[in-house]
């Protein structure tokens, strides 16, 4: 179907209109407020776009960007599955591109003996997983915990999960991109072709281009996973073991290492009941040492194996690794599940949250990277004090290795080689059942303020700031590079206005 953008709704600022009368695209347009364009998963921001465009392909994306470039004020935001928290994928009085509408694209390629898949930037990682595993028994190397996210969305941030200690984030596991820049150019880029655009776009928060295709390396997928959780009462033991596990060579350790903080109580949302992996497992609080504090810690581990592997061999490998750990005796939980079931385990959380009515409630989440050198103090001041009653959802904390990240990408990290990701993933009903969102946002602010006052080596992950001064502080000595890339690939600041980094430069771009 050909849809035409002939005239915007009556009453819009004529300075925001394209100079051309007609824009032909293969997709479709929706004018004004739609659910897809006005809100996101965070549920705390709303912004009415001028139009929502459902592009069929990269050519449609380029046409939309060029149309915006011919105006004085229009901006363009690419929206994946809407899981931003602070309105990052919104465009007030601008164009929102619903990237989920892009045509299905999935091609298996062999390049120099290595297997890759080409996928659409609007594809969900869950879709990629299911096709890779079911059709080819292959899988990408690096994932996010929740797979209802788009390929372009996670690659524009980083994409972190329990495999990142070994393979790096998802941004370190892509070899080629197709990107539409803020100039409306559609370019293929990689480490050797248009390399500056490639490095800028990965982790670039959508500031330099819109990802319409990605080439992702794949490897043989395991059949099964031994999913394990072990509990700690002391943070020092927890971090020592976690750091040991993530520094083991491939083939000598677990295939997945994550962890979380939970409340030392029977609170069904924040405490002991959140730990067991199976429905018939029970957390025995009598096992907790009397010296334990208000919170406990859980390492979440996984070992991949094949159907033909003998159970005794799997047990022996698990016992070898667990035998070195200092977890609380009697607080170990394990379950054997298929590889697909393990990667899709968060879907159960989504189903429960939807059933309880909290999936669509506000989500004042906070994500940080904190250096190893400051993580113990963070535990004392934040986990044991500010968050000692929990957050109504997971509090993730586990180590990552800086050496697995490419510093040429736009993501900024703490300086130390070992740093921790901390994620406060709140699932709380709105008032009167839950606390006011403003109170939780203030709690986030207090945590960030504490990190700044204590001079922690930290960075926000999935950052959101209200002033360019704070963005400059965030990027530090990488700010100049960030500015140069912006000037090169989006000189009039059309793209990703919801990030609040740059203001639209009211100067038309001469594109024919």
Image (cartoon, helix red, strand yellow):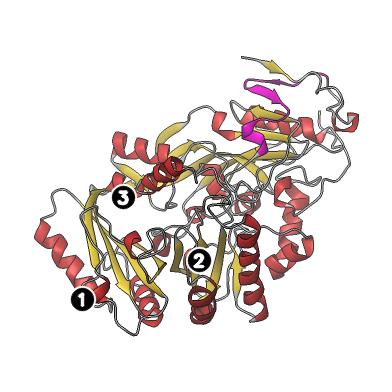
- Residue placed under numbered mark 1 in the picture: 323
Residue 232 vs 1, above or below: the answer is below
Earlier in the chain: of badge 3 and badge 2, it is 3
Give me the disc on residue 422. Answer: 2
Residue 446 vs 240, above or below: the answer is above
Q: What residue lies at 61% left-to-right and 66% top-to-bottom? A: 443
- Residue placed under numbered mark 3 in the picture: 342
Q: What residue lies at 18% left-to-right and 70% top-to-bottom? A: 319
Q: Secondary structure at mark 2?
A: strand
Callout 3 touching callout 1 (CB < 8 Å): no
Name the foreground residue: 466 vs 305: 466
Residue projecting furthest to the front:
432
Q: Where in the figure is residue 365, as x and y percent of width and height?
A: 56, 57
Q: Quadrant of residue 79?
A: top right
Pointer 3: residues within 10 angstroms few (<14), some, or many (20+)?
Answer: some
Callout 3 touching callout 2 (CB < 8 Å): no
């Amino acid at each position: 179907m050909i849809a035409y953008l002939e005239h915007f709704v009556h009453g819009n600022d004529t300075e925001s209109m394209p100079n051309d009368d007609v824009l032909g695209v293969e997709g479709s347009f929706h004018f004004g407020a739609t659910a897809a364009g006005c809100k996101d998963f965070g549920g705390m921001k709303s912004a009415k776009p001028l139009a929502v465009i459902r592009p069929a392909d990269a050519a449609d994306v380029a046409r939309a960007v060029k149309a915006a470039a011919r105006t004085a004020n229009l901006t363009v935001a690419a929206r994946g599955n809407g899981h931003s928290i602070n309105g990052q994928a919104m465009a007030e009085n601008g164009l929102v591109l619903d990237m989920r509408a892009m045509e299905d694209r999935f091609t298996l390629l062999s390049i120099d003996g290595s297997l890759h898949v080409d996928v659409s930037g609007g594809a969900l990682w869950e879709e990629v997983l299911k096709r890779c595993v079911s059709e080819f028994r292959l899988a990408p190397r690096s994932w996010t915990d929740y797979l209802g996210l788009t390929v372009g969305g996670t690659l524009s941030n980083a994409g972190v999960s329990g495999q990142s200690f070994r393979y790096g984030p998802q941004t370190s596991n892509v070899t080629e991109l197709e990107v539409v820049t803020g100039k409306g150019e559609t370019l293929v880029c990689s480490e050797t072709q248009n390399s500056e655009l490639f490095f800028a776009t990965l982790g670039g928060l959508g500031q330099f281009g819109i990802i319409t295709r990605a080439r992702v390396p794949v490897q043989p997928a395991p059949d099964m996973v031994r999913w394990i959780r072990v509990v700690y009462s002391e943070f020092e033991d927890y971090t020592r073991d976690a750091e040991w596990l993530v520094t083991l060579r491939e083939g000598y350790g677990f295939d997945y290492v994550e962890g979380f903080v939970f409340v030392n109580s029977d609170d069904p949302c924040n405490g002991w009941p959140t730990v067991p992996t199976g429905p018939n497992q029970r957390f025995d609080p009598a096992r907790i040492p009397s010296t334990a504090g208000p919170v406990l810690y859980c390492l979440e581990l996984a070992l991949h194996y094949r159907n033909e592997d003998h159970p005794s061999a799997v047990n022996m490998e698990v016992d070898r690794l667990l035998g070195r750990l200092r977890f609380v005796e009697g607080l170990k939980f394990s379950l054997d599940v298929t590889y697909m079931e393990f990667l899709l385990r968060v879907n159960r959380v989504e189903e429960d949250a939807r059933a309880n009515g909290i999936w669509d409630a506000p989500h004042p989440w906070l994500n940080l990277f904190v250096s190893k050198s400051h993580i113990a103090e963070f535990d004392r001041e934040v986990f044991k004090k500010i968050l000692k009653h929990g957050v109504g959802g997971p509090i993730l904390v586990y180590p990552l290795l800086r050496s697995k990240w490419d510093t040429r990408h736009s993501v900024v990290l703490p300086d130390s080689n070992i740093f921790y990701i901390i994620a406060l993933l709140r699932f709380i009903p709105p008032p009167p059942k839950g606390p006011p969102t403003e109170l939780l946002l203030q709690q986030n602010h207090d945590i960030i303020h504490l990190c700044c006052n204590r001079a922690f080596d930290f960075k926000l992950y999935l950052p959101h700031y209200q002033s360019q001064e704070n963005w400059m502080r965030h990027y530090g000595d990488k700010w100049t590079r960030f500015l140069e890339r912006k000037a090169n690939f989006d000189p009039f600041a059309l793209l990703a206005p919801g990030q609040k980094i740059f203001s639209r430069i009211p100067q038309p771009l001469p594109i024919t």
